Amino acid sequence: MKLQFFEPFRRIPGKEIHSKLIDFNSELYQFLKQYRDNIIKYSGFSVSRQRMDYHIALINRHERNNIVSFLSRVNYLNNQDINLNDINNFGFIGKAFVLFTPEVHGFGKTHITIAYFQYKPADIYHLINLHPDHSKNITSNYKPHIDSRSGYVNVETKNEKTETVETPTEELRLIMGDDNFEIVELE
C-alpha cells in the first residue's frame, strides 16, 4: 500500500513542526483508522487518545526549523510502498504499537503510531490478529485456544509459549470467525 502524505510539497504551519501528516484520503490512512478502531473495540486494552492525527516524525528536535530537510524527507517517503502483510512491519516502541516505515537518510528509522497503550500488552500476536485484513494469514502460526470455562483465550505464540489473553470469546468470534478457534479444556 502506498504511503501518501497530506499536501506533500509544503509544511502546514502550526500543525507540522517535526512530523508530516498522512493523507486522510489515502488507503493507508483508512487502514490505520480501521486497525486502531479494531484495537479499541476488541482488544480489551486501554488505548490513549491521539495527540495528533496519523503522522511520521521526520525532523529531530535540534533541527526543528530545517524546512529543506523536512521536505526532502517527505519527498523521499511519499508514494513508497508499505507491506502491510508482513508481521515484521508491526511492533512496539515503548507502549506504542506502530507500523514501521522506511528509514530516512539523516533521520533514521521512521514509524506511524497506530495505538498508544496505558500499559504495554504482553502479546503482540493478539494485536496482529486485529489487523483489518486478517484473512490474508498475517500470522500463519497463530491460532487461539479458548478455555471453555472462562471464555478466555490461551495463545500459542511463535516461540510456542502459551499465554492467557483476557478477551471474551464472543468478541474474538466476531473478529476471526468460528473456524479459527479450537475450544479446549484447561487442566
Image (spheres, rainbow, N blue to C red):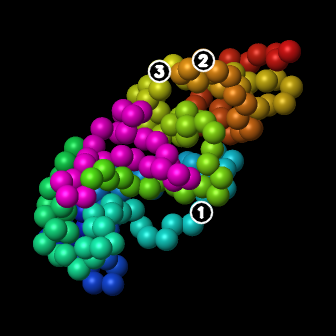
Residue 51 position, x and y percent, is: 49, 71
Query: Can you tell which quarter of the image residue 42 is in?
Result: top right
In the image, what residue occupies the spot 44% across and 49% down? 98
The label nearer to you, 1 versus 2, is 2
Instruction: Please state which of residues 132 and 117 is positioned toward the viewer in this rendering.
Output: 117
Q: Residues within 10 Å of mark 3 (few under 14, many from 20)?
A: few
In the image, what residue occupies the spot 19% across and 48% down? 80
Q: Identify the residue at the far front of this view.
A: 62
Classify residue 137 as left or right of residue 4. right
Amino acid beneath label 2: Glu
Which residue carries the number 1 mark? 48
In terms of sequence position, does the residue under pointer 1 or pointer 3 come before the other? 1
Q: Distance between the residues labelled 1 and 3?
A: 29 Å
The label nearer to you, 1 versus 3, is 1
| Placement of the C terminus among the 4 image quadrants | top right
Up-down: is 89 above or below 106?
Answer: above
Classify residue 185 as left or right of residue 95. right
Which residue carries the number 3 mark? 140
Residue 62 position, x and y percent, is: 30, 73
Residue 179 seen in this snapshot: no
Instruction: Please state which of residues 31 and 94 is positioned toward the viewer in this rendering.
Output: 94
In the image, what residue occupies the spot 30% across and 38% down? 83
The label nearer to you, 3 versus 2, is 2
In terms of sequence position, does the residue under pointer 1 or pointer 2 come before the other? 1
